[in-house]
Image (cartoon, helix red, strand yellow):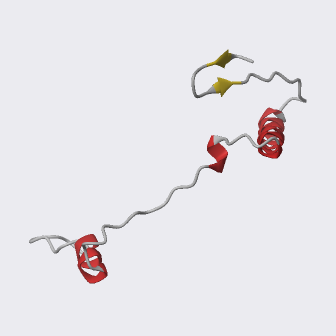
Amino acid sequence: MESIELDTVTLRLVARTLPGKQFEAGRQLRVLVIRALARAGIVTAADATVGLVEDPAVPAAEAAEAAEPSEVKGAVR
């Protein structure tokens, strides 16, 4: 264990691999660690989701118009 703070724990894992296999081995180890933490009921950043919260006061049509780029005078197309 590298460090323990109020809301985080940093783990450090060292492993020996064949030359050129360090990235593949690292990905596999991270997957195994995240799965083990999930089985133990520990929430990780990998469990986080990103969502879009829209302003209910803005109708969808207005939001779509605002998202479209406006024409710029002299713009080359």
Q: Relative to 34, is 57 on the left or the right?
A: left
User: Which residue occupies the foreground of this view, 9 or 62?
Assistant: 9
Place of residue 57 in the rendered image (x, y in percent of width and height, measured from the top left): 25, 72
The residue at 84%/37% (across/down) is: 25
Query: Looking at the rendering, which quadrant does residue 41 occupy?
Result: top right
| Residue that protrudes farthest toward the bottom in the picture | 61
Query: Along the horizontal axis of the image, is 18 left or right of 60?
Result: right
Q: Residue at x 31, y 72 (%)?
A: 56
Instruction: Reply above or below: 71 against 50.
Output: below
Q: Nearer the viewer, residue 61 or 76?
A: 61
Q: Residue at x 68, y 42 (%)?
A: 43
Q: Which quarter of the picture shows residue 73?
A: bottom left
Horizontal side, residue 29 vs residue 63: left or right? right
- Image: 67 above or below 29: below
Q: Position of residue 65 (x, y in %)?
A: 24, 78
From the top left corner, tell me how far across and down residue 68 is, in percent: 27, 74
Residue for point 73% across, 40% down: 42
Q: Quadrant of residue 6?
A: top right
Which is nearer the eye, 5 or 51?
5
In the image, residue 46 lies at what x, y percent? 66, 46
Quarter holding the C terminus? bottom left
Horizontal side of residue 52 vs 4, given as left or right: left
Quadrant placement of the N terminus: top right
The tally of labels here is 0
